[in-house]
Image (spheres, coloured by chain):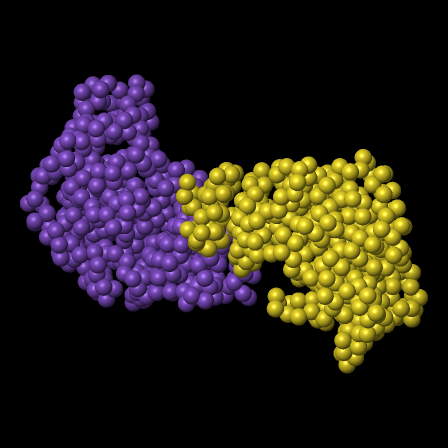
Chain colours: A yellow, B purple
Amino acid sequence: MNAVEIISKKRDGQKLSKDEISSFISQYLIEKIPEYQMAALLMAICLNGMDYEETGWLTDVMLNSGKIIKFPEPDFIYVDKHSTGGVGDKVSLILAPWVASCGVKVPMLSGRGLGHTGGTLDKLESIPGFRTNLSLEKFQSAVERVGCVITGQTEEIAPADKRMYALRDVTGSVESIPLICGSILSKKLAAGPRGLVFDVKCGNGAFMKSISDARVLAENLTGVSKSLGRGARALITDMNQPLGKYAGNLLEVIETIEFLRGNYSRDLYEVTLELSIEMLILSRQYIDAGSARNALIEKLKSGKAYDKFAEMVVNQKGDLDRFENKLPMNQCKAVIPIASDTEGYIQGFDTLGIGRLIVDLGGGRKRIEDKIDHLIGIEFHKKIGDLVKSGEIIAMLHTNTKSSAENESNILKRLIKIGREPVEVPRLIKERIY
Amino acid sequence: MNAVEIISKKRDGQKLSKDEISSFISQYLIEKIPEYQMAALLMAICLNGMDYEETGWLTDVMLNSGKIIKFPEPDFIYVDKHSTGGVGDKVSLILAPWVASCGVKVPMLSGRGLGHTGGTLDKLESIPGFRTNLSLEKFQSAVERVGCVITGQTEEIAPADKRMYALRDVTGSVESIPLICGSILSKKLAAGPRGLVFDVKCGNGAFMKSISDARVLAENLTGVSKSLGRGARALITDMNQPLGKYAGNLLEVIETIEFLRGNYSRDLYEVTLELSIEMLILSRQYIDAGSARNALIEKLKSGKAYDKFAEMVVNQKGDLDRFENKLPMNQCKAVIPIASDTEGYIQGFDTLGIGRLIVDLGGGRKRIEDKIDHLIGIEFHKKIGDLVKSGEIIAMLHTNTKSSAENESNILKRLIKIGREPVEVPRLIKERIY
């Protein structure tokens, strides 16, 4: 079957076969199928969709376009987590060592900030010396030795995704559930996990604004993973306000360390714990949620989770002492308190706006070549539903110039809505999709 | 607005503005927008459609990418016809001089055979010396002087269509009503007609198999033409059997000459007359269908229509005497009679199969560079509903080798179905869309 026939089949809403998907992509990778034919197929997929089986085949072909790590069987113990991204989402930093401290192996290939959301690698690079560019060999041996690693994807991982994503980006086919699944899963599965837990964020700071969109993505990610023989569970979690106390690269590492030392905010604790429980269950090392929960609580209390974090940092050449000695964190040129003008309840956050403000201040990238100022960020003193008095501090803006700070803090103030009416606190775990 | 935003807008089913369409195509033509972005937009249009106004803007931009002939105002007298193509469809050859003999000007830019359907230019080139590559200047002056011209599109006509069609052909976006409309109309309108009559063929030998598909195309062609200020009328006509007595390039010219000399088959006469009436009405030279019909019948009877045909042929350097002296037409190496094996009624023709058989025998092109054997064709002695006796000749196959003739005539025989039951004759004019 030739390229035009395959494109036409998808254009007409028909299901492609494994051979058709495989031959199209492999021909594309050797330049036998030109960009314009791939662009047409991607748009047809974007508009006519793919079922789990087709998306699984697509993922498999993309995955097999590059190197894939194989861990020894039985490999249930190797489990990873993926988040669709949000503001203040430092869950990976805490969860990887926490879960590893319970005896589960976490081979985590992670990414950088995308749009208004932060990136795990950017956060970790706040730690002096921390290496996020391990070779796949070092990555694999560290998973076995330490139990958890967080590093960047190498060029050898899913090159098909790299080319297809670049093309989607310039041809309007980014917003497609099967293509998003193929892209996420081909990169995640290359690291060799046998199980995957998905944290699908939902709310005004997430890519999925509505619960129905989030549910479709969660169902697709788990359904496709299962069609490829992997264990998979998804939680849909709230992203209508920044998660935890801090948003910003260095600030989120500080929060991670505080968390692992036993000082955490309720929302971050609940989301991280629930995701970690799912990982422990997928690993088949724990018989049920209760025993997984008990193990996690014990490892946190005993300091074993923190020790694992420190071990991971050392293994990746990070200098935690230097990081902590550089604190207090007000080494930032300007730390501006944001006080409430009125008394009332926090009604909500413009979470997308907060993410964008951090990027605008230099705490994230607008273009791939931009440098990040790791010190930039925001400290949140209040959450949705909290009562605030007039003049009470609701947030602290960490920025790098005093000159523009007044303007910036006014922007931030407008992103936090305060009103007379008491409001309901959003449910953190909105749905579980197994 | 940038290219990705325009693609995304159409992907999301929104209406594009005139500026967006115009800037996208003009940027494409100067290579500022690459093929893959155009491929993505074309697929999005293919799947999400365009309304008449958008399609009109698209057509207008494509039209204005090349030269456009302007006739003096008031220009109602300049009227052209377009057929979506069929087997045995020699209507243009008859209609152009017939209508011109009634004082209407027919500036006809025509095409070559496409798929299983014949092409007007290929047919006319059966006449020795006939030129189908007039310059636009010669074309325009001949319209004024002779009243009708049929020639090929030059490179100067709608270059945007040429590039976009080539891309659609390799990216699965040929089958799209707005893109088909844009392609047809941008080429047709470049020749300067003020009115257009569409012959939308419908049936097993047409591109539109169902009446509903044909209706949508007819409504779009007329609707978009009107949105561009042109008069437009469409007839949906039957293509469940070859039109007239002959299919094949030289044979169809013979049938044209016979027709204009007063010897015609009923179906070809009715379709050509009805389309000609519509052209006369659009020209505003005739007050109603009755007076248009009377004029046409008079010009045919008096020989004025034939004279106009001969004048057009001479003007385009064709040698009608040499053409007629080379007859009888059994100069073909093999003219094979096809006799019925049984008694019964003609139930139907596999008209697509017949068109393909003629192409296979060398009477049409499979690739653009193929040479045509003008002598190849089929003579039909029977039509749907006709009673045939066992052994009676139903068709004559004109082919170029005796050796394979038996095989070929068996193929042809299988394409004509004969059965016991009397059948209804298909209605020739199925619908009129004004």
- Counting the numbered discs, the total is 0
Q: Residue B57 appears at what percent x and percent y?
A: 45, 60
Q: Residue at x 77, y 73 (%)?
A: A399
**Nearest to the observer: residue A178 or residue A72:** A72
- With B12 as the anchor, is A246 left or right in this view? right
Q: Residue A17 appears at what percent x and percent y?
A: 50, 38
- Residue lying furthest right in this view? A389
**Nearest to the observer: residue B131 or residue A401:** A401
Q: Residue at x 23, y 27 (%)?
A: B410
Residue A185 appearing in the image: no
Instruction: Give the image quarter of residue A400.
Output: bottom right
In this rendering, is residue B196 above or below A408?
above
Q: Residue B277 appears at what percent x and percent y?
A: 29, 48
Q: Quadrant of the C terminus of chain A?
A: top right
Q: Residue at x 10, y 52 (%)?
A: B319
- Residue lying furthest left in this view? B325
Q: Residue at x 91, y 71 (%)?
A: A391
- With A339 as the anchor, is B35 left or right in this view? left
Residue B129 appearing in the image: yes
**Nearest to the observer: residue B184 or residue A410:** A410
Instruction: Give the image quarter of residue A370.
Output: bottom right
Q: Residue B218 appears at what percent x and percent y?
A: 40, 47
Instruction: Give the image quarter of residue B225.
Output: bottom left
Q: Quadrant of the N terminus of chain A?
A: top left
